[in-house]
């Protein structure tokens, strides 16, 4: 079973204050880049894996999706999503994505944002998702970039220009990584970019696009704290097709 850190009261309290949770999709700097990867959503049956507060699930319905199934391990997340959703075409379900089984050929799009780096058996997951999609359906997801995860943060140092630098820590060594984020001992799983892409290919997906998100100069002007994201990629955005 995946670590259910989001039901830790201290973690959930801190996480709930992040701009992407307070302001929704508009608070996520990478959202416009994600939107560019998504297909037309009208009449699509969608599964949102790691749906959190349901921001993407609700947006997808606004774009014309026929139905959205939002799945999350956290009861806190699902409860909040249900509280702020009034749409019978959106169903929220508490389940462990690590062991989840979806019905075959049930969806036209599988989507996930910043969830799969908490999953140990990624190969099993992508095979399961492949079975759940109809032919031609798309699988779009974002994860914490493997270089970001392998960076030995928070042990950054400043270069001669005063910029923060994160040394990469054993990038080639895959497996469990623990970090302190709101609370101590948050468990994530490091996989190289190659391992991630090859898992999709072996499951039968065709890779359509791979993006390594970096903020634009305009985003940095509006939020100077984003400038450090130019030092190493923070997120990996992947679009693939069954």
Image (cartoon, rainbow, N blue to C red):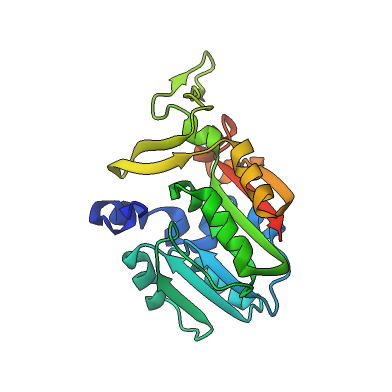
Could you tell me residue 129's position as x and y percent? 58, 62
Query: From where the camera sits, is residue 69 visible?
Result: yes
**Against 104, is 207 above or below?**
above
**Residue reaching furthest left?**
9
Can residue 28 be seen here? no
Q: Quadrant of the N terminus?
A: bottom left
Foreground of the two, 3 or 29 = 3
- Residue at the location (58% across, 41% down)? 220
Residue at 24% across, 56% down: 9
Q: Determine whether, in the image, residue 38 is placed left or right of residue 16.
A: right
Point out residue 70 in the picture as x, y percentages from the top left corner: 49, 70
Q: In the image, what residue occupies the spot 53% across and 56% down?
A: 125
Closest to the observer, 60 or 117 = 117
Q: Residue furthest top?
A: 160
The residue shown at (37%, 77%) is 83
> If the image is split into quadrants, where does the C terminus sit?
bottom right
Q: What is the x, y in percent for residue 227?
A: 55, 35
Is 189 placed above or below 77 here?
above
Q: Is residue 147 above or below residue 36?
A: above
Along the line of sight, the residue nearer the viewer: 21 or 198: 198
Q: Quadrant of residue 175?
A: top left
* Furthest residue in direction bottom, as rendered: 88
Please indicate whether residue 99 sits to the left or right of residue 212 in the image: left
Disc tally is: 0
Residue 105: quadrant of the picture: bottom right
Where does the image place residue 85, in percent across and percent down from the top left? Answer: 45, 78
């Amino acid at each position: 079973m995946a670590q259910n850190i989001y039901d830790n009261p201290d973690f959930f309290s801190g996480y709930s204050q992040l701009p992407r949770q307070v302001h929704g999709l508009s608070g996520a700097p990478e959202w416009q880049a994600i939107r560019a990867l998504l297909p037309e959503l009208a009449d699509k049956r969608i599964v949102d894996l790691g749906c959190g507060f349901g921001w993407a699930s609700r947006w997808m319905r606004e774009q014309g999706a026929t139905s959205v199934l939002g799945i999350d391990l956290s009861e806190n997340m699902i409860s909040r999503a249900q509280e702020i959703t009034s749409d019978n075409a959106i169903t929220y379900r508490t389940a462990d994505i690590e062991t989840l089984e979806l019905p075959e050929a049930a969806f036209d799009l599988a989507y996930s944002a910043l969830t799969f780096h908490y999953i140990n058996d990624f190969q099993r997951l992508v095979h399961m998702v492949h079975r759940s999609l109809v032919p031609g359906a798309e699988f779009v997801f974002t994860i914490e970039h493997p270089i970001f995860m392998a960076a030995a943060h928070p042990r950054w140092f400043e270069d001669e220009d005063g910029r923060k630098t994160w040394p990469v820590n054993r990038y080639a060594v895959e497996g469990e990584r623990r970090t302190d984020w709101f609370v101590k001992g948050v468990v994530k799983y490091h996989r190289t970019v190659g391992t991630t892409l090859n898992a999709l290919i072996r499951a039968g997906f065709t890779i359509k696009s791979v993006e390594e998100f970096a903020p634009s100069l305009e985003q940095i002007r509006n939020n100077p704290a984003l400038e450090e994201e130019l030092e190493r990629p923070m997120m990996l955005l992947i679009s693939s097709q069954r």
